Image (spheres, helix red, strand yellow):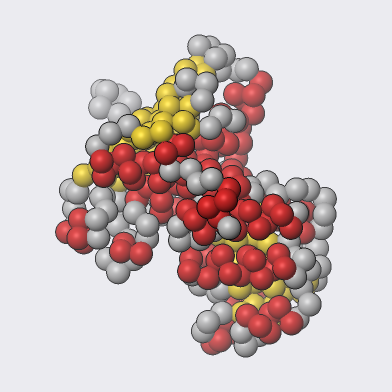
Amino acid sequence: MRIALLGAGRIGASHITTLAAHPEVAHLVVADADPERAQIAARAAGAEPVPDVDAAFAADPDAVVIATPTSTHAELILRAVTAGLPVFCEKPVAADVKQTADVARQVAEAGAQVQIGFQRRFDAGYQAARAALRRGDLGELHRMHLVTGDPAPPHADYIPTSGGIFRDCHIHDFDIARWLTGQDVVEVYATGANRGAAFFAEAGDVDTATAILTFADGVLATLQGSRYNGAGYDVRAELAGTRDTLVVGLDARSPLRSAEPGVPAGTEAAWPDFWHRFQPAYAAELAAFVDVAAGRAPSPCTVAEALEALYVAEAADLSRRERRPVRVDEVRLPVEATR
C-alpha cells in the first residue's frame, strides 16, 4: 500500500523507519513543515520526501499517518476522512474537548477508520495484564495503582501550551486504565503541587500530581505522577484482585530500590525516557494500523475512546483547581454542543 506520513519530528522520524520496513508498505511519502527535515528523514529510510501536506495528499495514498504539531491534528484528520482514507494520528486529537468531540462526531458520521496513538495499549506488559484480568487470574479486581514519572521536566516553552499534566501526561494513564478494566471512570478527585521550576506554576500547571479515580463498577484507582523522577523513567500499573496482584512495568530496568536488607537493586540501567521504554509498542501500534488500512481490522483506539480519556483529564484538572471531587459527567459535552 501507499502511505502518506505527515510530520518528520522525533516520533514522525521513527514512524518513517517503522513503516518503510513494513512488508506491506510499498511506497511511503513524507511531508513536514520543514522540507529539509522531511528530506533527511525520508531518504534515511528509503522513503520519498514531498514538499508539503498538499503534495502528500496528491500522491494518492491509501492511508495517512499524522505526527504533526497538536494544533494541526483535527484539520488533518478531517481532511483525510473527507478523502475516504484511514488515519493514524498521534494523541491528542485536538487542543480542547469541544474540538475533540466535534472530530469524534464527524468521524462517526463518516464511518471512517481513525486510530489514535495511545501506545501503551500495544505494550506487552499491559496486554498480558489485560488478558490475565479477562481470564479471571486476579479474581475480582478491587484496586489499581498507576504511576507515570518523567526523569526530567519538558522545556519551559512547552508547558504553557501542553494542556497541563493531566491532559498531556496522565491522559495515557486514564486511557490505559479504561482499556485494562473495560470500565468508565465516573469520578475524579485530584490535587497537585509545584516542587520544582517556577515555570509550571507560572503556566497554571503542576509538576507533581495525585488523583483518586472511581470506576463505574466501584473499583478504585490511585494515580501518582511527577516531572522530576530523578531515578529514571517510571511507568507502572498495579492491579490487585481477590486472588492475585499483577504489576506492569516491574522489571530489571524499573527505577526502584528496596529498603529491605539484602534485596538486590535492578540489574540494568533505568529507562531514560518514554521513547526507549515504549519503542516496541510504537512499532506494534503502526503494524496494527497497517491492518486497519488494509481493511482487516477496525481501529483499536478510536477518536471516541480518546475523547473519553480526555474527559477524565478534564475532570482531574477541574478537581485540582477547585479542590473537590468531580463527576466526569460534569465536563461531558452534549452531542448538540459539538455542532
**Residue plotted at (64% across, 66% down):** 78
Q: Is residue 25 visible?
A: no
Left or right: residue 116 compared with residue 173:
right
Exactly how many numbered labels are in the figure?
A: 0
**Residue plotted at (56% across, 79% down):** 32
Determine the image quadrant of residue 222.
top left
Left or right: residue 213 compared with residue 7:
left
Q: Position of residue 43 (x, y in %)?
A: 64, 81
Q: Position of residue 100 (x, y in %)?
A: 53, 56
Which quarter of the rendering shows the N terminus? bottom right
267, 101: nearer the viewer: 101
Q: Is residue 23 above or below residue 137?
A: below
Determine the image quadrant of residue 115.
bottom right
Q: Position of residue 168 (x, y in %)?
A: 41, 54
Q: Is residue 193 visible?
A: yes
Q: Is residue 49 above or below residue 6?
A: below
69, 239: nearer the viewer: 69
Determine the image quadrant of residue 260.
top left
**Residue plotted at (58% across, 58% down):** 339
Q: Residue furthest front?
A: 336
245, 260: nearer the viewer: 245
Left or right: residue 126 compared with residue 96:
right
**Residue plotted at (42% across, 39% down):** 330
Q: Is residue 135 above or below residue 93?
A: above
Q: Position of residue 201 (x, y in %)?
A: 20, 55
